[in-house]
Amino acid sequence: MQLTVSTWNINSVRLRIDQVGRFLKERRPDILCLQETKCPNDKLPLKELQAFGYPFVVHMGQKGYNGVAILSRYPFTETGVMEMCGRQDARHITVTLSREAKAAAGVTIHNFYVPAGGDIPDQGLNEKFKHKLDFMAEMRSWGSRSKPTSAPAILVGDLNVAPLEHDVWSHKQLLDVVSHTPVETQALEELRQEAEWVDAMRALRPEPEKIYSWWSYRSPDWAAADKGRRLDHIWLSKDMKDTLRSIDVTRETRGWDRPSDHAPVTAVLEL
């Protein structure tokens, strides 16, 4: 059985509902995890999402910003959220697939939206950057305490860190830019390695290949400049590593009309 999982920071699900539908029609993943839905639960376009062929939807949202959702072709037996750093700011949601998912039954999917961190990489001067580091520290503590990789699990999301040298267009020029500073990359890699998550993209497509999933709106010609960063990730529990068959970035979505600045990342597993 193949299980296809996609993750996408959609930057407003209501504004880009047609793009969600187009992506789902073209790629047809079994699971789509969205970040930055930017709407409260009662404003989620649920009927439209279900009409795309995804009857099982769970969402944790708030007005105007943040928000995470999981769309699935398969039912789930459990859902849950974590309030990270003592804030109710809709940055995590999880599901466990039910027996109707056949070989995928029991797989838990975690969807995270890590804070961006603002513009100044200094905890003393920038509260947003401090929150980002605190958030990742709490993720690390959760991983150590709850052992999420002790059973089949997938962690996806906009983690807002490009951890490796070839995850950015210029390692040297971005060392002092939020999302690629050493304190962030070290924090993300430590929490990943400590919980024994496998970075699916780099498992199949190792460095020095350059891979990006985000291109700034500030670039007048994002495609020609190609100054991207790999901020969107799919991680697997180590027992799922050998099931990974392919993983890619649907780069063309960045060129659609009124696009998100992120492109979807999709992994195909053979269970």
Image (spheres, rainbow, N blue to C red):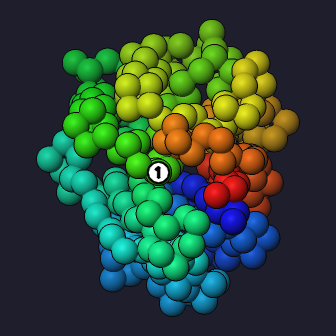
Q: What residue sits 75% from the left and 31% below the top?
A: 205
Q: Quick check: 27 above or below 122?
A: below
x, y percentage for residue 111?
43, 54
Percent across and percent down for residue 251 are 76, 49
Q: Is residue 42 visible?
A: yes
- Provide the residue designation for mark 1: 152
The front one of 162 and 119 is 162
Please identify the quadrant where the N terminus is shown: bottom right
Mark 1 Cα within 10 Å, few/some/many (few <14, many 20+)? some
Residue ID at (54%, 24%) = 163
Image-based side of 268 in relation to 61, left or right: right
* In this rendering, position of residue 136 left or right of residue 104: left
228 above or below 156?
above
Residue at image x 67%, y 76%? 21
Q: What secondary structure is marked by label 1?
A: loop
Q: Give the quarter of the image for residue 202.
A: top right
The image quadrant that residue 131 belongs to is top left
Q: Which residue is drawn at the image coordinates 40% and 22% (left, top)?
A: 190
From the viewer's perspective, is 158 left or right of 1? Answer: left
Residue 167: % across, % down: 65, 26
Q: Position of residue 37 (x, y in %)?
A: 45, 65
* Position of the C terminus by quadrant: bottom right
| Vertical position of residue 53 compared to residue 158: above or below | below
* Quarter assignment of residue 49: bottom right
- Which is more toward the observer, 103 or 220? 103
